[in-house]
């Protein structure tokens, strides 16, 4: 054990930065709430097979990155490496497909992957995840993509890009896969890449190494071999996206890390982040529910990384949590004034105004410093002499101006100035 520190790849989020984290998390989820998605909580751990089947046996996530353990009852459990598989497991378990469709769900929470930590890549991170299940309608694909875009826009982000493609489906991917395998066989690839090609040849297209990319110029692409129905589906998705004012970049070599993607597939990248540029991604996964033993229904969704989106917000110099701290502060000087301060702060909070006071035995200087640090625009300062006169001083902390207000009117006066 390396002392009482957070484990490698995990970190604490503390004030004042945590206000930005919360603002990012809430801004990313607001568009989902506005669009009728319902909030779901699922356990942070699941039976291991939820992920081995739900994410795919051959993926890096399942083969190398899961935190898997046996509990005291001998069950193999895994800390969730992503949130989709657990949501779909819950969808199946509670037979949500028997109700009104589509079933629209969202969640936010911790995910765990045993990855090599670096900037923007952690072992514990937070994802916003949303899914629309049970209907295969291109308009729904467009809604999902557009909601992701909206979250980033609402944060004020501009330097991000939507990468979009279609991965086909069972009517055309097997034939395309054969074409691609035949093409890859002719290339000069190392052993490991060949092995990867055998498991999932599409992954080779996404290989970032220049020596591999150099050989892929004339590799066949899925988008050129879509069946009529998947092509029509993709055309309709793009038409709806245009109508929704969403722009994208065609990314015919985009392959996502999870196995079950079909048809619409997308990723959001941010250009201010260096190597770990993906801030979110998703797509249609029409085989996932069936793979988990559920009904054969379609689904589409995305996951956005909250931590990485926060890095993107910082890279663009955006101030997303301008209202960190409290609105109002009360500085009591002396025991009598303290009772008034505690009462005032309680009244303000009950009235929906964020407020704070000092605790412990602080002198005037220390108390005024606490008031300045609190983020409040206005304070009430109450000294012994003020109390004897039946007043408190209402002070504008930005200009230093102050005026005496009768004790009985302090609450209303302070509330009025901070909410004006
Ligand atoms: P994925 O589930 O791999 O498609 O990831 C979805 C999003 O989660 C990514 O676009 C990232 O923003 C975020 N993410 C994935 N892995 C990590 C990680 N190890 N550390 C931080 N964020 C991550």
Image (cartoon, rainbow, N blue to C red):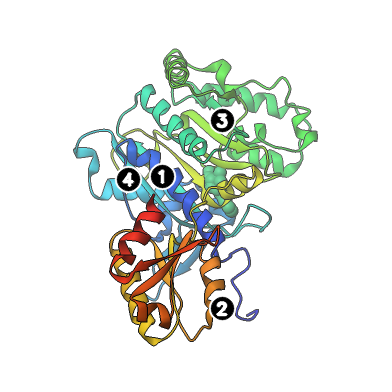
Q: Residue 331's spot in the image, x, y percent?
A: 45, 74
Q: Residue 353's spot in the image, x, y percent?
A: 35, 59
Residue 162 numbered tag: 3
Name the quadrant of the N terminus. Answer: bottom right
Q: Residue 362's spot in the image, x, y percent?
A: 51, 83
Eye-nearest disc, 1 or 2: 2
Residue indicated by mark 2? 366
Q: Earlier in the sequence, mark 4 or mark 3?
A: 3
Give the Cα separation between the discs numbered 3 and 2: 50 Å
Eye-nearest disc, 1 or 3: 1
- Cβ at disc 3 under 8 Å from ligand 1: no
Residue 293 numbered tag: 4
Q: Is residue 179 visible?
A: yes
Q: Secondary structure at mark 1?
A: helix
Q: Name the quadrant containing residue 76.
A: bottom left
Q: Earlier in the sequence, mark 3 or mark 2?
A: 3
- Cβ at disc 4 under 8 Å from ligand 1: no
Give the Cα separation between the discs numbered 2 and 4: 63 Å
- Cβ at disc 1 under 8 Å from ligand 1: no
Q: Is residue 152 left or right of residue 130?
A: right
Q: Residue 263's spot in the image, x, y percent?
A: 46, 26
Q: Residue at x 45, y 44 (%)?
A: 28
């Amino acid at each position: 054990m390396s002392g009482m520190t957070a484990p490698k790849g995990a970190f604490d989020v503390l004030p004042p930065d945590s206000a930005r984290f919360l603002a990012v998390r809430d801004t990313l989820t607001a568009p989902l709430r506005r669009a009728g998605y319902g909030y779901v909580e699922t356990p942070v751990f699941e039976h291991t097979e939820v992920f081995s089947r739900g994410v795919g046996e051959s993926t890096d996530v399942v083969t190398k990155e899961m935190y898997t353990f046996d509990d005291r009852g001998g069950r193999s459990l895994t800390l969730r490496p992503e949130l989709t598989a657990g949501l779909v497991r819950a969808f199946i378990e509670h037979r949500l497909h028997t109700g009104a469709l589509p079933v629209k769900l969202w969640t936010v929470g911790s995910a765990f992957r045993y990855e090599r930590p670096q900037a923007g890549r952690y072992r514990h991170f937070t994802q916003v995840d949303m899914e629309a299940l049970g209907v295969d309608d291109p308009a729904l694909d467009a809604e999902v993509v557009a909601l992701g875009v909206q979250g980033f826009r609402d944060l004020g982000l501009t330097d991000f890009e939507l990468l979009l493609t279609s991965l086909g489906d069972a009517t055309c991917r097997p034939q395309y896969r054969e074409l691609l395998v035949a093409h890859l066989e002719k290339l000069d690839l190392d052993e490991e890449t060949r092995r990867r090609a055998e498991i999932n040849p599409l992954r080779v297209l996404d290989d970032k190494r220049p020596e591999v990319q150099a050989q892929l110029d004339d590799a066949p692409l899925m988008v050129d071999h879509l069946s009529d129905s998947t092509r029509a589906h993709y055309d309709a998705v793009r038409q709806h996206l245009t109508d929704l004012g969403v722009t994208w970049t065609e990314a015919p070599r985009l392959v996502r890390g999870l196995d079950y993607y079909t048809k619409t597939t997308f990723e959001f990248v941010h250009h201010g982040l260096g190597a770990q540029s993906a801030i979110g991604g998703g797509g249609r996964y029409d085989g996932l529910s069936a793979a988990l033993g559920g009904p054969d229904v379609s689904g589409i969704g995305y996951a956005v990384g909250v931590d990485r989106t926060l890095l993107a917000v910082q890279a663009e110099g955006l101030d997303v949590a301008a209202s960190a701290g409290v609105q109002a502060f009360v500085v009591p000087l002396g025991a009598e004034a303290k009772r008034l301060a505690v009462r005032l702060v309680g009244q303000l909070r009950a009235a929906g105004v964020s407020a704070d006071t000092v605790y412990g035995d602080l002198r005037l200087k220390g108390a005024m410093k606490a008031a300045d640090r609190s983020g409040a625009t206005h304070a009430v300062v109450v000294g012994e002499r003020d109390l004897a006169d039946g007043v408190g001083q209402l002070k504008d902390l930005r200009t230093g101006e102050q005026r005496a207000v009768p004790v009985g009117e302090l609450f209303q006066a302070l509330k009025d100035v901070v909410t004006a």
